[in-house]
Each structure stands twice: as C-alpha cells, then as structure tokens.
Amino acid sequence: MTTTAHDITYRLEQKRRVQADFPGPKSVALTQRRKAVVAAGVASSVPVFVADADGGIIHDVDGNSFIDLGSGIAVTSVGASDPAVVGAVKEAVEHFTHTCFMVTPYEGYVAVAEQLNRLTPGDHEKRTVLFNSGAEAVENAVKVARLATGRDAVVAFDHAYHGRTNLTMALTAKAVPYKTNFGPFAPEVYRMPMSYPFREENPAITGAEAAKRAITMIEKQIGGEQVAAIIIEPIQGEGGFIVPATGFLPALAAWAKDKGIVFIADEVQSGFCRTGEWFAVNHEGVIPDIITMAKGIAGGMPLSAITGRAELLDAVHPGGLGGTYGGNPVACAAALASIGSMEQYDLNARARHIEEIALGKLNELAAEQSVIGDVRGRGAMLAIELVQAGTKEPNPELTKAVAAACLKEGVIILTCGTYGNVIRLLPPLVISDELLLDGLQVLAAAVKANA
Ligand SMILES: *Cc1c(COP(=O)(O)O)cnc(C)c1O
C-alpha cells in the first residue's frame, strides 16, 4: 500500500491510549467550572478538555490520547499544530495582531486573495473578500448575488446546512437544534428537493432528472427570473454527507446560467483538499459563480472567504462589504501556510489515499452488517448511514451508541444527518495510515457490538 504521508513528522506520539474511566479528574473539574459560566446552549460531544493536538491525535488534560476522526468539524486538515502554520502565526503575531483591512491594509490579505483566485475553479477574472466564519461568507455571497441581479429570491435545498446566523438559519433545513424557537427567519428563501440517491423513491432517478424536478418546482413556485441565487453544498455536510447523483450539479448550474441566477457553491465543509480535489465541484467540472470557503482554509485559525466572478463582486459599491476582523492578518498568515502545506504534502492525493483505505473497510463492514444502509462520500469526507437492519428506516439510537462506543475506546467520531443516523469521517488529511486503520477497526467493532 502506498502512502504519501512519510514526509510528515509528528510532534506528539501518534497512538491511541485511554484510561478505563475517563473523563479524568481534571476534565471533570473543568466541566463543573464550565457549567457555572458557559451557556448551556453550547454543547460539546466529547466530555474531555484538550491539552494538545497534532497530526491525528488529541491529548486531553488527564493524559488520554484520542484518535481524531473529526478534525474539529473538517477544519484541521493539515493537523491542529502544523509546524508551517504555527511558525507563520508566530511570525505574524509578533508584528501586528490587527489593523483592520478597511482602515490600514496589509499584504497578507491580498496574498490570500491571490491564492484563492488561483485555486478556485474557472479561469475567469475573479475577486475575493475575506471574513471570519462560514456563515458570514454565506451571508455575503447572498448579499452580492442580490445586489448584482437586483432579485430577491434565494433557493436552498433539503438537508442543507449553511450556518446559524439569521439568514443562514433560514437557508439551513434542519429545525432541531439549529432553528427551533429562533425565528422569525429571513424571508425570500425557498427550499427545493435535493438529489439523495439512497432515499429517492425511485432509485433509478438520474442526476439530470433530479435537477429537472427541482428546476420545475423553482419555475412553478418562484419563477426563474425572480431568483437571485441558488446555493448548494456540492456534498452536503451536516445534512448527512449526501453526494448528489452524477449530473445533478452540472444541470442545476447550467440552468442557473441560462436564467442569470448566481450559482453559489457552499464549500465551507467540502473545500481545501477534503474530497481529494481543491473543491468538491471539481469532481464534475462545475464552475460556480461564487464559492464560499471557511473550515479547512487556515489550519484552524478563524478565516472565511468568498471568491467569485469579478463582475459580480465588483458590482458592489465601495464600503458595501467588509467587517472589523475580516481577513485578520494572523489568520491570513495561517491560511497562506496552510495552503502551502496542502501543496507540499499533496493533501489532495492524501485524501484520495484515505478514501481508498477507508472506503474499502467501510464497504467490507456494510457487506456483513445490514444496519449499514449506505456507504458514501469522496476523499476524506466519508460516511455510513445506519438503518434498522435491512430497511431504510433511520437508526439514530444505534448511531449514538456507535459514537459513544468509539469514544470509550479513544476514537472521536462525529455524527450528522437530517435523521441523526449518519456517522461521518473527517480525519485530518495528515493522519498516518496506522492511526486511520486503528480508528476504522474500532469503528467496525463498535458497529458489530451494537448492531
Ligand atoms: C459549517 C458550515 C457553515 C457555517 O460555518 P461557520 O464557520 O460555523 O459559521 C456553512 N456552510 C457549511 C456547508 C458548513 O459546513
């Protein structure tokens, strides 16, 4: 088996080691302190506090080491302490922490924009704006699309996740926990059926047919000429790692182009080598008008961006876009270093290598466990959908039990899905083969023990 990870050196030993009775005393004490001061609405899925993290390993404050198959939700693709990122952050922070790009600009912001314009799909003239969070990027992509088109309506999809701010809550599909009792929501958001191969009533429906279904509904319910933007995750994240049928995205993008609708690819979770390409749209050669980015962009430092056609972004009047912290200089330094590491280690190849290893193991497991209804994903964005044995009935109880069993053995895995029945794998792309295989073996044992 080949690996391209041999040139990656780790600071921490890459080994899973957990005591029988964690959380240990320090994590328990910190949890008590936390409960007294941190709002209950912020929940953590793992009951330990972190002391250190590197490569595919997270150390807690009591000396336990966990295999990280979540990357802090697809963020630490280059690891949580990539030496290049750490060095660049130290260097930047010694000079200036902030000036505000809208007051006194600095080179790092421009350099990140150059990189994003180079790496995003399409060789048209592009412009970039930097922000802090994924939700903020989505908000701004919609602002630009509305201004540039002079239209109001925004189309989103079933199972979509676009964030937790008011507009992005409206775009997000799932009520609990993201929306319930947080309304009223932003108007002029319309939801259309997604292509979800595993749950299609007619399993033979093609991507083009699924696109036609959505397009017909848009035409009947809104009217193509009223639509400012279609926003879609090329592979849906929180909604369940749903990979639309081949042809779905190209057909939607082509129709949007025809109608003068801005096609926004929300690549906040799927971008930056996660799927084995710089962006998930590249798998089908789709060229979005605007692409939203965050999570994996800066090795864990808070940064987000929109990159899009120059004529769209330059349509906005001076001062119409921005924010106090957007494109913070330290975060920009981290992004440049992180992109450098992605190229140096060829993390696209590494993500495809992870797919090869993990998909093989997951398919083997699915062949013998009828509680696994579907195995899907691309690169290092992979999932299994758990069902009542031999049916398509979602099995969220089993999903919770499997995640808990993995954690007990020292493997951090995340769940997702509209029905809460999907286990998603998002390992750091620099994880070693040994650690990945160990994590997968723990997952397999957990499914077998709980099925
Ligand atoms: C996480 C996510 C967001 C929101 O990003 P935040 O940084 O949490 O605001 C938006 N879109 C997608 C696809 C995401 O996965």
Image (cartoon, grey):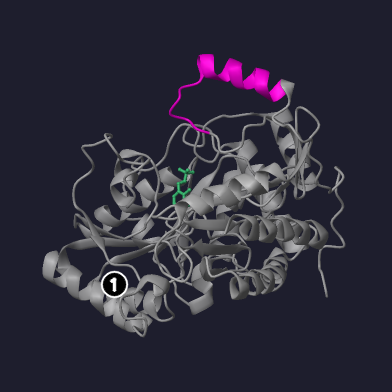
- Residue 73, percent across and down? 57, 48
Determine the residue positioned at 64% across, 71% down: 359
- Residue 187, percent across and down? 19, 47
Location of residue 443 (image quadrant): bottom right
Quadrant (top left, top right, bottom left, bottom right) of the N terminus: bottom right
Q: Which segment did they paint magenta? A: 26-43
Q: Is mark 1 within 8 Å of ligand 1?
A: no
Residue underneath mark 1: 256
Please indicate, yes or no, whether residue 299 appears anywhere in the rendered image.
Answer: no
Question: Which secondary structure lies at badge 1?
Answer: helix
Main secondary structure type of the part rendered in magenta: helix
From what the image shows, is residue 113 above or below residue 359?
Answer: above
Residue 180 falls inside the magenta stretch: no
Location of residue 60 (image quadrant): top right
Quadrant (top left, top right, bottom left, bottom right) of the C terminus: bottom right
Residue 27 falls inside the magenta stretch: yes
Amino acid tagged 1: Ala
